[in-house]
Amino acid sequence: MLDCNVCYPSDLNYEIKISGESNKNYFPDILLHLQRKKLLVSYEENVLVVKELAIQDLYDFFCDHLDMETISFRIDNKEWKPIRQISETFDSKWIDQIILEESVQSYVQPIVDETEEIYGYEMLARFIKEEGQFYSPFEAFSAAKARNRTYSLDRVCRMTAVRHAGFTNKKVFINFIPTSIYSPEHCLKTTTQLTNQLGIAPSHFVFEVVETEQVEDLNHLKRILMYYKDKGFEYALDDVGEGFSTIEVLKELSPNYMKLDMKFVQGVAADSDKQETAMNILQTAKQVGAIPLAEGIESRDDFIWLKNIGYKLFQGYLFGKPAAIKDSND
């Protein structure tokens, strides 16, 4: 198994690189102060590795006395960033608590067929603040990205959705971010173990690839999808027109479902450009043997137009808004 902090976040250590002749004069005093406070992890030449508890005071001191333009930081050996951007990482610490406490509420939105009968549900995540309020998915995943916690948060969402999947005997669609997964054999093992523990057949689940436009390593994505397929799960590709450029690639990925994004759905009945995109993706789905699904439908005119050209599944406010699933332990 991987031995890292991506599954269960621990406090971050920050590397601080202090450059510039005037700044270097302060280095011995900074070093001594951090050692005295037991906040120094290590140091080498002009680079300090410090505990997160040191960051706020250290940043304030830098602002008052040092040339900020020649100071940079990084976490987990990622790219160096200007020190002025450190607040984004530090101020996002709340996401660690969300992950550790698994403060995620599952919501579901129906997916219907041409007759408007429920075919399945997409599982959606909401992130619990205090007093019944929620962080948006954008806020949560932005914070996770700032702290290199994307895999941790994606995993919590995925596992929470699987735990709640027994509310229906229909298909459940669960989002995942492929760029967050280091190794499918390790990172997805807990998902398959949980479905086995719950006694839910793998064919009940459709894992939906999101952020396809950010997928650069198609071989890595294929490994993930083949892992799911080998375990008996199905999978869907989102934003197909954006993230994948050739029929050959899509045939290799061999998705069970292909989603038409809402930006091509809403208003499609009266927009020739959107109609062309919708028809192209429909044709592609047929060529690769995938079921075409249109999401974000709010207008009956759009639904009828898409149904008439051959789309099989539909999702959107027209058929139902996302609704919370109550935890079985509540």
Image (cartoon, rainbow, N blue to C red):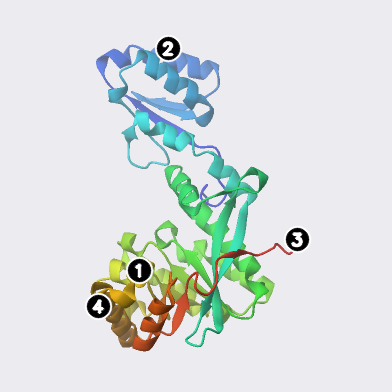
Which residue is under mark 4?
A: 276
Residue in view at x 47 percent, y 86 percent: 114
Q: Position of residue 28 (x, y in %)?
A: 40, 13
Q: Is residue 320 visible?
A: yes
Amino acid type, label 1:
Asp
Q: Quadrant of residue 296?
A: bottom left
Q: CA distance from mark 1 to mark 2?
A: 53 Å
Determine whether the residue tagged by mark 3 lies in a helix, strand or loop.
loop
Q: Is residue 156 above or below residue 272?
A: above
User: Which comes before the other along the chain, label 1 or label 4?
Assistant: 1
Q: Quadrant of residue 324?
A: bottom right
**Residue 329, label in figure:** 3
**Residue 239, label in figure:** 1
Decide if residue 5 is on the left or right side of residue 77: right
Q: Nearer the viewer, mark 1 or mark 2?
A: 1
Q: Position of residue 254 (x, y in %)?
A: 37, 80
| Near-viewer residue (219 or 86) | 86
Amino acid type, label 2:
Asp
Q: Nearer the viewer, mark 4 or mark 2?
A: 4
